[in-house]
Amino acid sequence: MDFLCQAIIFDVDGVLIDSDPVSERHWRAWADRHGVDYDAIARIHHGLPTVETIRQVAPHVDAAKEAQIKETAEADDTEGLRLYPGVKGLLAQLPRDRWGVATSGTRRTVSLRFPHLGLPDPLVMVTADDVQRGKPAPDPYLLVAERLGVAPADCLVIEDAPAGVQAAKAAGAKVIAVTTTNRAEDLGLADAIAPALAALQISVGPEGLRVQTNSAV
């Protein structure tokens, strides 16, 4: 498929950064401490704010407090983090005012991981700290679009999780889902499916940003 847009909004974990080793390590430790089945966490946590995952799997605990403890520890842990192939080159192609990020992670986490991995600091970054309602609500994507000065309908979102795809579609954006952390059949709301960011071809022209992928829904 061929998409023409005025801005691209990236999810972070599962799209730009492979943080699965860090995420799994900390979720397993948290599950062990609280007697929660890790598999129940693994089924839902991709794309959801930490506090929402905890509310769903352990309604008996103080979710806000537990989320803060876990996120602080995880933000400082960079062991095993890596970029997905092609990320640096792709971001280098884009004008800095034509892309932003929307993540269910915290601002502290992103602010530490981007420089650690050699990524440019986004001009527009919306995290779990910036919105009352996280994904799958549309709020993160609506706020990025507003800060970029681009209508949501003129934005293309790159996501990897069902909650993120749902959020982007609810915001009115087009969505390409990458199958780095979820199966294609779980990402059915997306406008197109690609195996990873490296499968996309992006060009910048006077009419906007053109993104091509050979895979379609």
Image (tube, rainbow, N blue to C red):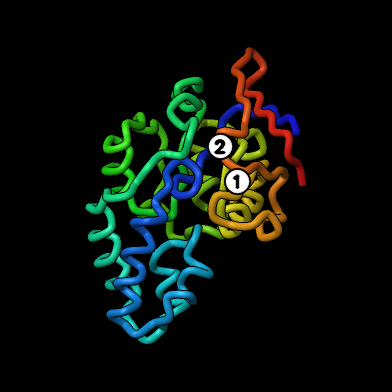
For this view, does 126 lie left or right of residue 136? left
Mark identifier at residue 178: 1
Mark identifier at residue 208: none
* Callouts 1 and 2 close, C-beta under 8 Å: yes
Q: Amino acid at mark 2?
A: Leu
For this view, does 215 lie left or right of residue 197? right
The residue under label 2 is 197
Among numbered discs 1 and 2, the one appearing first in the sequence: 1
Count of labels shown?
A: 2
Q: Amino acid at mark 1?
A: Val
x and y, in percent, of residue 185 in the image: 71, 58
Residue 164 drawn above or below residue 124: below
Give the residue displayed 42% in from the left and 44% down from the top. 17
Give the residue displayed 50% in from the left and 20% down from the top. 93
x and y, in percent, of residue 204 in the image: 59, 17
Q: CA distance from mark 1 to mark 2?
A: 7 Å
For this view, does 61 lie left or right of residue 194? left
